[in-house]
Amino acid sequence: FFHWFDYKAWYPLGRPVGTTIYPGMQITSVAIWRAMPHYMPLLGLQPMSLNDVCCMVPAWFGITASVSLGALTAECSGTWSAGVAAAAIMAVIPAHTMRSVAGGYDNESIALTAMCTTFYFWTRALRPDPAVADGRATKASVVFGVLCGAAYVYMVAAWGGYVFVVNMIGVHAAALCACGRYTSKLHRAYSLFYVIGTLGATRVPPVNWAPVRNLEQMGPLLAFVGMQLLEYVEVQRRARKLSVLQVQLLRAKLALPIALALVGAAALLMQFGYFGPLS
């Protein structure tokens, strides 16, 4: 797929299809089609053709997008009643139905599922655990942080709207820190999400190194760097039994030289044209 060159598209130049489109939708369709002979006979059904699978993918993923949004709402509100209501609304709003009609084969058909699933795993990773005290990391923050990163990679492979997803999670993480709600749980969840997601995103041909070069994606990167600083201070707080004032002083002491170093590095890289333009 990644070496496919279509001589009929953009004639007479042709088009390297595998490196100029987001491959998530095509790979998903082929994966479903290849899996069908293994489980369809068990249900007493005949496998479908690849063409029929492509026609039905938007409808199938319209269902999963509604379920994912319902799970996200239930996680945020703490009640499954709100989740069911949100899923029902998602299933009928025009903006979603126009992208989940059978035969409407477009990137958004699977991207909404990927987006809602990524947001669900992110919020699930931050669920409080009564058994864990003193702001320490939880098992869920690690497990669902990894799953959040994996879902984000799928989102990147599906649609260019992945920039919105990474910025929303970055803004949420930064807002929690600004509100004084930083914990090691937040550090584990965001760090795993960002590292796994960014490494996976760079392997998608149309994206390449954009996550660490585009100006519109610098915010999540800065949040990641800041999170490492805060976690170092948090480790020192526990080990040395620091007071609130000592914690704030240590944060300021470390933040100033790091900020100056980042500004200097950014200024130097801009001279070499490292950063890409805003899209």
Image (cartoon, rainbow, N blue to C red):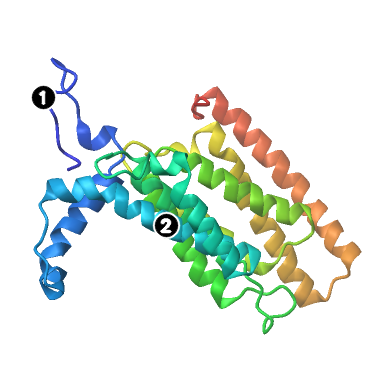
Q: Secondary structure at mark 1?
A: loop
Task: Name above or below for residue 128 compared with residue 4.
Answer: below
Q: Quadrant of residue 72?
A: bottom right
- Earlier in the chain: of badge 1 and badge 2, it is 1
Mark identifier at residue 151: 2
Q: Secondary structure at mark 2?
A: helix
208 sits left or right of 79 in the view:
left
Image spot of residue 70 (x, y percent): 51, 61
Task: Name above or below for residue 2 compared with residue 81.
Answer: above
State how far apart marks 1 and 2 are (Cα). Answer: 33 Å
Counting the numbered discs, the total is 2
Residue type at the position of mark 2: Ala
Mark identifier at residue 7: 1
Image spot of residue 107 (x, y percent): 33, 40
Q: Residue at x 46, y 59 (%)?
A: 68
Residue type at the position of mark 1: Tyr
Image spot of residue 255 (x, y percent): 75, 49
Q: Is residue 195 visible?
A: no
* CB-based contact (under 8 Å), mark 1 and mark 2: no
Task: Name above or below for residue 262 compared with residue 16.
Answer: below
